[in-house]
């Protein structure tokens, strides 16, 4: 009987036409410091530890559409970010460079688009 090897999720990676620009957006949004900084790769880490958020430059990046229609580039992943004040967090997201998405599927969740077009959700419990 074999045992499963240890696995540790270290980061979620978002592609972007400019990794540095998108990383700086999320640094403003989340307040996380830069942990790793290379020309086409940047990782942010939460101050209290845990999995980070990484960004890599992808020259063939195609901006996703939210919501996607037939033949549209679909999102491959999105971030869910819990907040304590949905209105204040939304204002901060917009001030940081996000755009409120036209389509809002739930009352207690707000969908925003980061500068590279990745949807992310702010939600309150």
Image (cartoon, grey):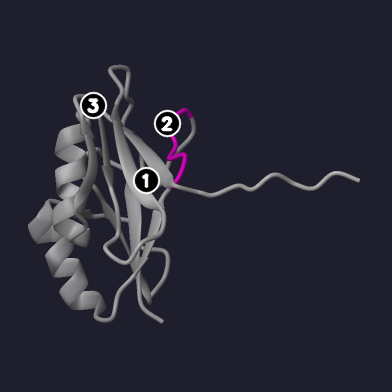
> For mark 2, does the 10 Å Cα neighbourhood hold few (<14), some (14 to 19), or many (20 or more) residues?
few
Q: Name the residue rendered at 13%, 66% in the picture.
A: 92
* Quadrant of the rendered image containing residue 89: bottom left
Percent position (x, y) of residue 63? 31, 32
Q: Is residue 97 magenta?
A: no
Label 3 element class? loop
Q: Which residues are magenta?
A: 71-77
The mark that comes first in sequence, 3 or 2, is 3
Q: Which residue is more in the foreground, 28 or 121?
A: 28
Name the residue carrying label 2.
72
Task: Give the residue furthest to the right.
Answer: 1
Left or right? Give the position of 34 relative to 7: left
Q: Name the residue rendered at 54%, 49% in the picture.
A: 8
Name the residue carrying label 3.
17
Name the residue carrying label 1.
66
Q: Name the residue rendered at 38%, 75% in the picture.
A: 107
Label 2 element class? loop
Task: Point out the frontmost of discs 3 and 2.
Answer: 3
Percent position (x, y) of residue 88? 16, 76
Task: Give the residue furthest to the left.
Answer: 95
The mark that comes first in sequence, 1 or 3, is 3
* Quadrant of the rendered image containing residue 62: top left
């Amino acid at each position: 009987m074999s045992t499963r090897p240890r696995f540790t999720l270290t980061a979620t990676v978002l592609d972007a036409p400019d990794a540095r620009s998108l990383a700086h957006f999320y640094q403003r949004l989340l307040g996380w410091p830069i942990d790793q900084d290379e020309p086409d790769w940047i990782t942010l880490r939460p101050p209290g530890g845990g999995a980070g958020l990484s960004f890599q430059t992808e020259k063939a990046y195609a901006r996703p559409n939210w919501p996607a229609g037939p033949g549209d580039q679909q999102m491959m992943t999105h971030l869910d970010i819990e907040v304590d004040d949905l209105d204040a967090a939304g204002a901060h997201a917009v001030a940081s460079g996000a755009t409120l998405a036209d389509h809002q599927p739930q009352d207690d969740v707000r969908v925003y688009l980061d500068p590279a077009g990745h949807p992310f959700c702010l939600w309150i419990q």
